[in-house]
Amino acid sequence: EVQLVESGGGLVKPGGSLRLSCAASGFTFSDYNMNWVRQAPGKGLEWVSSISRSSSYRYYADSVKGRFTISRDNAKNSLHLQMNSLRAEDTAVYYCARVHDSGDYSLVYWGQGTLVIVSS
Amino acid sequence: DIQMTQSPSTLSASVGDRVTITCRAGQAISSWLAWYQQKAGKAPKLLIYKASNLESGVPSRFSGRGSGTEFTLTISSLQPDDFATYYCQEYNSYSWTFGQGTKVEIK
């Protein structure tokens, strides 16, 4: 069974940093691109970042470019999101998500999410 | 970035109704579109990928159509479990965009 379990969320002051992690199991982690998607309270979904299987390609939403860094450790089946210079508008539930089996880039498996609150 | 516009924002319907949600892309995205269902406090669930492909395990009352810039998600006969918020998402580019969501409410 595919499982994605996020951790690392919490309360942080504006300008602070936080590192999110996503532990993957039930599939060959190194075979799939991975993503972070967030959802601010009461709002819609926002794609944040993607990383290719071997970390060769990394993509970011304009809203986080230069502040967030996505990474992965295929040996440990883990995905990370380093978030620096956090702002109030970064407050959201952050989900990690895996792309589809068929090579399609839709997001077929999602974690339960971890809540990040940026507030003084 | 590609803009994705969903309509309507809210839809009131009854059990058994046929409902259709529309998603328009700001530029052509071929068939690189997915539909998700999200219930309160839960992660999104993939329903449709590549515009018209039903994800495994998703009931056949859900269907997707379209290509280019206009797409639809149809629920042929609304069931109590279908009251939720639905999002489209394009993945044609490397700056993916979700629609703003359509909340399907009980009439």
Image: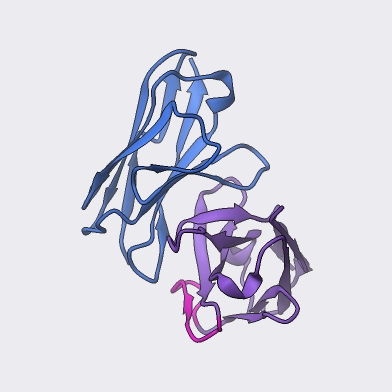
Chain colours: A purple, B blue
Is residue B27 shown in magenta? no
Left or right? Give the position of B11 relative to A55.
left
Tell me where residue B61 sits by quadrant: top left
Residue at x 61%, y 75% (from the top left corner): A30
Q: Looking at the magenta stretch, what is its main secondary structure?
A: loop
Is residue A60 shown in magenta? yes
Residue B10: x, y in percent? 43, 30
Query: Exactly how many numbered labels are in the figure?
Result: 0
Q: Quadrant of the N terminus of chain B?
A: bottom left
Between A53 and A40, the residue placed more toward the observer is: A53
Q: Is residue B95 above or below residue A4?
A: below
| Residue B100 in sight here | no
| Residue A76 in sight here | yes
Residue A64: x, y in percent? 52, 75
Residue B2: x, y in percent? 31, 62
Left or right? Give the position of A14 relative to A38.
right
Between A42 and A19, the residue placed more toward the observer is: A19
Residue at x 31%, y 57% (from the top left corner): B3
Q: Is residue B67 above or below residue B65?
A: below
Left or right? Give the position of A118 relative to A36.
right
Q: Which residues are magenta?
A: A54-65
